[in-house]
Image: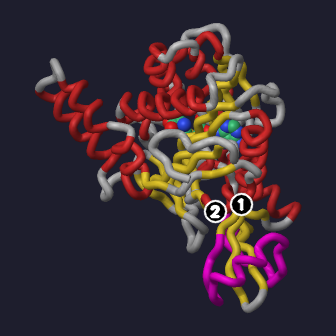
Amino acid sequence: MSDLRPLLIAQIKAQGPITLADFMATCLMHPEHGYYATRDPFGAAGDFITAPEISQMFGELVGLSLAQSWLDQGAPAPFILAEAGPGRGTMMADILRATRQVPGFHAAMRLHLIETSPTLRQAQHQALGRGDIIWHDSFVDLPDLPLYLLANEFFDALPIRQVLRDGGHWRERCVGVTGGDLGFGLSAPMAIAGLEPRLEDTKDGDIVEFSPQARAVAALIGNHIEAKGGAALIIDYGDWHSLGDTFQAVKGHEIIPPLADPGLADLTAHVDFAALADATASGYSRLTPQGVFLERLGITQRAQALTAGMSGEALDSHISAHRRLTHAEEMGNLFKVMAFYPKSATPPPGLEP
Ligand code: SAH
């Protein structure tokens, strides 16, 4: 049993039921017992594997797309190369290696990482092995320079609220205490500011998820890019608009009930890309399946080039990594890519306006 369960139960008994957003924020980021605050959850021995951990090709191609966007916008110097939620630092290491050949890129770049977990900051420091990294807790204090940013599986970790349509109102799904343990409940029907448009495309009983924090982050990133130049590549599982319950807990590569192990399981929800697009003042690209994006960037050629000198198990695992990243039945379709870029610019390679 986690140490967070008694803390949450005591808090709810004292102050009343909490929203899923409060539950998620506490479980993921509680300074002492939070999931990300206390561990490195990635890889075969951890709870889940992300695209950059599957193959170096992912970070290489994403990095080159961003670097081409920098060239397309006149190679501004200096500029910020930033990553939101860099995990173990694997993707940024691959990006830095792949972009070494891009003339002027490394000389002009200032490296900024947005990461709240001290454990993962440590891992990132080790993976990147350089002394010029600046870490941030949030996006508000990035310097006033053109911003080239990556976010892979970052937005899915931001807290969501979940509501059930009830006539012209919404009932919010909350976490309360029933029979001495954590349990779900529903609030009384209420109007929720900002959700009026969703009354147009939902029916009674539908579940809608929304993330005030994701919207706020998208606005900060997108407005910065519109004002100063740059581009953001946002990669995550999700879709255009949210519909249905996607709140999920994963532990040891298995899906478990979301309230079962607070602080010991990863909690995520699908990303509503329409909400991110709505929040930004910048231009944004068409939402594109990850498999299509990587194929357009030449992942097959890159995969073939890397097979030179490979054999046996290494070759098998390389082939299966390529398939896993791109195939429609694996990550290729579930994961989507969207870019923010200035309205006066073109989207990064691999994406369309
Ligand atoms: N991008 C990495 C890791 C994804 S996991 C990969 O693809 O492997 C989510 C990452 O976001 C972790 O590094 C986590 O610590 C970080 N994170 C989660 N919520 C955050 C927040 N509100 N602010 C900053 N970082 C956050």
Q: Secondary structure at mark 1?
A: helix
x, y percent for residue 273: 61, 58
For ligand 1, give the image quadrant: top right
Q: Is residue 284 magenta?
A: no
Indicate yes or no whether the magenta region holds residue 193: yes
**Residue 257: x and y, percent?**
52, 62
Circles 2 and 1, Cβ within 8 Å, touching? The answer is: yes
Residue shown at the point (47%, 54%) measured from the top left: 288
Can you give x and y, in whole percent of width and height, for residue 188 in the image? Answer: 81, 83
The image shows residue 332 at horizontal and vertical percentages of 37, 52
State the predominant SS element of the stretch in magenta: loop
Q: Is residue 259 left or right of residue 306?
A: right
In the displayed orientation, state which residue is furthest to the left.
312
- The circle drawn on residue 274 is 2
Q: Which residue does the numbered mark 1 point to in the structure image?
A: 278
Magenta part of the chain: 179-208
Measured Cα–Cα span from mark 2 to mark 1: 6 Å
13 sits left or right of 1 in the view: right
Give left or right: position of 140 versus 214. Answer: right
The residue at the far top in this view is 131
User: How packed is label 1: few (under 14 Cα within 10 Å), some, or many (20 or more)?
Assistant: few
Q: Give whichever of 245, 4 is nearer the camera.
A: 245
